Image: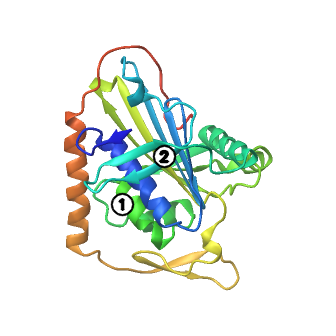
Amino acid sequence: MLIKKDEEPFFYKFLSIAKEIIRKNKRYTPVFYGDDEKLYLVCNNYAAVYDFQSNLLLDDELREFGKIPYELSELPNGDMKLTKSEHFSCQESYLIAIRNFFKHTGYMSKKVFSVDKGDPYKIPKIVEVTQRWISEEDNKILDKIGFPDIYMLDAKRVDEFITLAGDWNPYYLAACDQTELNGGQTTITMTVYFNIKEDPKKSACDQQEMELVQQPTNYDEFENEDVEEIEDEVVEDDYQEEEQLDALLEDTVVPEELEDDFDPMLA
């Protein structure tokens, strides 16, 4: 399956995020697989879901991924390629645990706020609002997502999640972005999960654009000591990439018709 940036910009963006997650976790084997209209990735402390829902009649390759494992590669010209793998890269028990994670985060996650488009201090605000830690190394991934809705486990369901989902970290964060095509007939959602196995707050000591100081008596509290200005050219590069993808998305059209319903994050 060949994915070109100018033909499927939202899918291309998801795969570029998946590639970045895999690249920064080279010591870990990614689990990348399809489940009909969804595509899932788990790699070390990260997870991601691409969900394509449409009321239109589509080519099967465009909207469905089957129930098979995949390998992701990037061609020299920048196109992304999804190739069917010979077998799953993990044991069956771990695959069951992964599916269990996605099942319960889908309906137990609660939206806490939306990142404003154009906000250069989105990382510190995510930390401030959620009281969850975002590693400085995750900035590049969040920049690729853009300005998403931020979800976390509903605090009332922590014990339930631990009971049902097993050893996954209940203090994960999820960043969700969504686009609509064909007058709302087609809805595509990507969700990237951070800290699914462990909380990096226990070992992290720095944070992008905001210096966070741990208190000696209670490490869950921290103070905002300083916020530095982000260089104009870095912000400008982010805007240009976002504008390019938005322009491509506006021109994207998907063929005709069938009926289905979709509710983002309830997946």
Quadrant housing residue 254 = top left
Task: Classify residue 201 by image quadrant.
Answer: bottom right
Residue 115 visible, this orientation? no
Q: Position of residue 222 (x, y in %)?
A: 57, 77
Q: Residue at x 24, y 33 (%)?
A: 252
Residue at the outermost right position: 163
Q: Position of residue 98 (x, y in %)?
A: 66, 46
Q: Is residue 62 above or below residue 131?
A: above
Q: What residue sits 57% from the left and 33% below the top? A: 67
Q: Amino acid at mark 1?
A: Asp
Task: Judge by depth and name the residue closer to the eye, 100 or 156.
Answer: 100
Q: Quadrant of the N terminus?
A: top left
The quadrant the C terminus occupies is top right
- Label 2 crowding class (10 Å Cα cut-off): few <14, some 14-19, many 20+? many
Q: Quick check: 40 above or below 53?
A: below
Label disc, if present, on residue 191 of the rendered structure: 2
Report x, y in % for residue 154.
Answer: 64, 47
* Residue at position x 43%, y 44% in the image: 82
Q: Which residue is mark 1?
A: 143
Name the residue nearer the viewer: 56 or 235. Answer: 56
